[in-house]
Image (cartoon, helix red, strand yellow):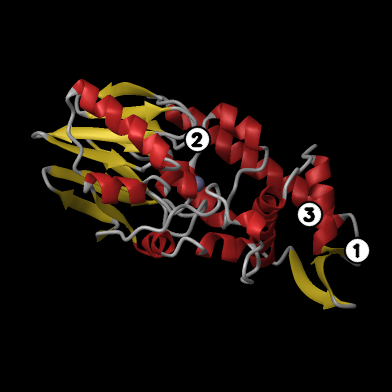
Amino acid sequence: MKLQNLAEHCYAFTGSVTIGYCIKEGKGLLIDSGLDASSMKKVIKILSNEGLPLDYCVITHAHADHFGGAHFLKNKHGTSLFAPKLEKAIMENSILEPIYLFNGANPINDLRNKFLEGQSVVIDDELKIGENSIGPFTFEAIDLPGHSYGQVGVLIEDVLYAADSYFGRDTLVKHVIPFIIDADQTLDSLEKLLHIPCKGAIPGHGDYEENFVYTVQENIDLHEERMKSLIALVNESSEGYSFERVVKEYLKLHKIAVTNVGQWLLFRTSVTAYLTSFERKKLLSFTIRENELIVIPH
Ligand SMILES: [Zn+2]
């Protein structure tokens, strides 16, 4: 983990997940809190070595790698926490993520790990979409749903902390099919990113770039290709494939070999999100045949 200077008052701890940091009038603001207590201990150590303050933390969305460290931050360091409405509810009841991944049933133990279920934490206050003021900081919370329901990007001092609204090139290649909960919202948020005037942006996983629009465009291109290959697969069978078969064949097509239940459920959610977008456009429908969920092309 390294502290990188992005602009006069703006920094980021870079590593597997970005943690933003801003300083103003002797107060410090974090953007996201990393996976767990150990990542927050590293952040606090670097800040105290540099003589930098820490008072507030804004959390962009309720995925464990972005909020898992918040419990430690609040309880051991007294940091005030802020998050968007629906994401706040999930952080405060973090079993909701394994619950929704497991179709709403009480999740199996395999899913109850720190990567899918961050430690629950009470959030002090809700962020509103648009301008927010916390202590000496004024910033804009930009609504960027699609990767999660209420995800926001934080635009502060001309730097955009974009959360997981887009991914750096290496992460895109690594994930193959990025996690999304809504394909249309994902693409709308990506389009929105192309027109946000700022000096530069940093995603939740990837590097700070001034010309980040090229990386955003790569994300758009990737989703469009993923959707094209999925509808082609669905269209192969006029009477329809079972949903399970669509997932299986689609992962095979993209040379993905899943190694655990959690990873499979994450991919299934993204495939479902693409299929839902096609259903809205009346390119396919869902039905039940012989007790199986079937995807029928139109
Ligand atoms: Zn995320």
**Which residue is labeled 1 in the image?**
238
The residue lying toward the viewer, choosing from 103 and 289, is 103
What is the C-alpha distance between the residues marked 3 and 1? Answer: 17 Å
- As helix, strand or loop, the secondary structure at mark 3 comes to helix
Q: Residue 288 at x, y = what percent? A: 82, 77
Question: Label 2 amino acid?
Answer: Val
**Left or right: where does residue 221 sit relative to residue 239?**
left
**Left or right: where does residue 175 sit relative to residue 208?**
right
What is the C-alpha distance between the residues marked 2 and 3? Answer: 26 Å
The residue lying toward the viewer, choosing from 79 and 283, is 79
Residue 54 appears anywhere in the view: yes
Position above or below: 244 against 68: below
Q: Residue 155 at x, y = what percent? A: 29, 41
Crowd class of label 3 (few under 14; some 14 to 19; many from 20; radius 10 Å): many
**Residue placed furthest toward the left:** 25
The tag earlier along the polypeptide, 3 or 1, is 1
Q: Are marks 3 and 1 in contact (CB under 8 Å)?
A: no
The residue lying toward the viewer, choosing from 225 and 13, is 13
What is the C-alpha distance between the residues marked 2 and 1? Answer: 35 Å
In this view, the mark in front (3 or 1): 3
Q: Are marks 2 and 3 in contact (CB under 8 Å)?
A: no
Position above or below: 284 against 265: below
- As helix, strand or loop, the secondary structure at mark 1 comes to loop
**Which residue is labeled 3 in the image?**
247
The tag earlier along the polypeptide, 2 or 3, is 2
Q: Residue 295 at x, y = what percent? A: 80, 66
Q: Residue at x 62, y 61 (%)?
A: 101
**Which residue is labeled 2 in the image?**
216
Question: Label 1 amino acid?
Answer: Ser
